[in-house]
Image: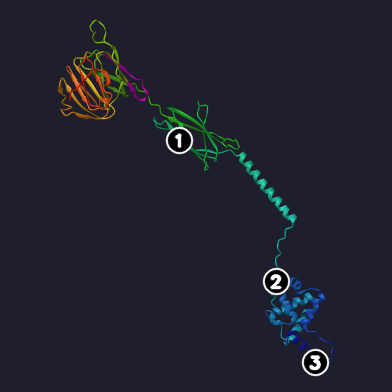
Amino acid sequence: MTTRDQARLRAAEVRSEAASRGVPAGPPLASLPERLLTARERKGVDLFRAERDTKIRARYLAALERGDYRELPGAVYTKGFLRNYALYLGLDPDEVLLQWRRERGDGPAADPVLVVPRTVTAPRQGITISPKVFGGLLLALVVIVVVGYVATQLVRFSKPPTITLTDPGSAVVTVDASVTSYTLRGSSTPGATISITIPGRDQPIQVTAAADGTWTSDVQLRRGRNQFSVTATDPETGKQSDTPYALVINVPITAAVTPTLSLDQPADGAKFQTSAVVVHGSATNATQVTVSAAFSGPATTTTGGKPAPSPAPPAAQTATVGSDGTFNVPLTLAAGKWTLTVSTTATGGGTPVTMTRAVTVNLQGVTLVVSIKGGSAWLKVWEDGVLDPTIGAGGKTEPNNKVLTFSATNTIEVRTGKSSITFFTLNGQSLGSLGAAANPETWLFDPPAAPKKTNHT
């Protein structure tokens, strides 16, 4: 038996009890579920419309119309639902509650405190965008993007590139007097063209800033004040940095000190009986000295009054001035009169100093200079027929670039293991290499006769 059937049965019992007490019978009394269902249908709404209007779940309303009160959360909630539903359907809520109690078989006990249940929140409606609204939103978005792009370009074109120097760290710096170049470092807008203008130079030095904005450039320095102007240019907009960066790099100018020069030997007018002449002296404020020799004329004349042929002058010789200020420059001069010129190379750009000496070489005997060039060579030497003690009876292998000087009264004889790399200078006159092949050869030097090959071993 359903709850609705039970409600009908209870209504019948009420009518029977009334009849037994002599109460006239009225029209049949409908059960509460039937009254609710009939009132809703008369109102012309379905359960879902009633749910939206009353904020009571449809399943609870259906349970009330079936009389299935077990589906409801409790008596207190049931009375609240019945009161709200009765008001909605146009019924008397007190009568509806009284009938509900009678059909449940409750006595006339006082109603418990009514706690109204939380109403059902109507489901949130989804956002519906019509085509017109969508088109308007899309147009607004396009306008925002265009305006943003234009604003960005305006800011870009109106804002000049930046320029800073990180090295040197100040606008005026002084470097060491020996510095001839400097590496400038800085930062700017990425891709900007950095121009470094130097007074007196037509074209500036230009470099491009890297992706991170850094840039470097090497500049040449001269002694004194070096002034630079550094600017940045955006290659796309053509705008330059507002204020060029002015930089000054000072290179100290040292005072030029005039060197001094003195010659201890040879004395002016000195005469030598050997071709080996040593120039010795001292200098201050000088790094090097250079000695050159110019032939002035023969020391004697040949038979018949004809002058001897002029020998080729030796190459100029350069020597470094020692820490004590002294220097030694050896020369090999042929017989004759010579003018020696000694000049200094000054420190710090001072004016060089030059001195001259006149000497005469009137050879007595034989002076032979032997040079090894192009490898090592074995040598054996006889001076006036006697083995040279520095070479020895077994000969000696001399290294590349070795220079040896031998002297004798009449003759010098040299045996070389490699004739093509052995060079001779006889009495200041260069003879060069006497042999074309790298073969052992022996040469006899007996001036004034020409050198000749012998079989001396």
Q: Assess whether residue 353 is covered by the magenta stretch.
A: yes
Q: In the figure, is residue 88 to the left or right of 258?
A: right
Closer to the chain start, of discs 2 and 1, is: 2
Local secondary structure at mark 2: loop
Give the quadrant of the N terminus: bottom right
Q: In the figure, is residue 95 to the left or right of 274?
A: right
Instruction: Give the alpha-carbon distance from disc 2 to disc 1, as whole Å.
Output: 79 Å
In the image, residue 441 lies at what x, y percent? 22, 24
Q: Which residue is mark 1?
A: 183
Q: Residue at x 60, y 39 (%)?
A: 159
Q: Assess whether residue 377 is covered by the magenta stretch.
A: no
In the image, residue 79 lies at what x, y percent? 72, 79
Residue 120 badge: 2
Closer to the chain start, of discs 3 and 2, is: 3
Residue type, label 1:
Thr
- Do tag 3 and tag 2 residues touch (Cβ < 8 Å)? no
Local secondary structure at mark 1: strand
Between 66 and 114, the one lying in front of the other is: 66
Q: In the figure, is residue 44 to the left or right of 290?
A: right
What is the magenta range?
A: 344-358
Q: Which residue is mark 3?
A: 16
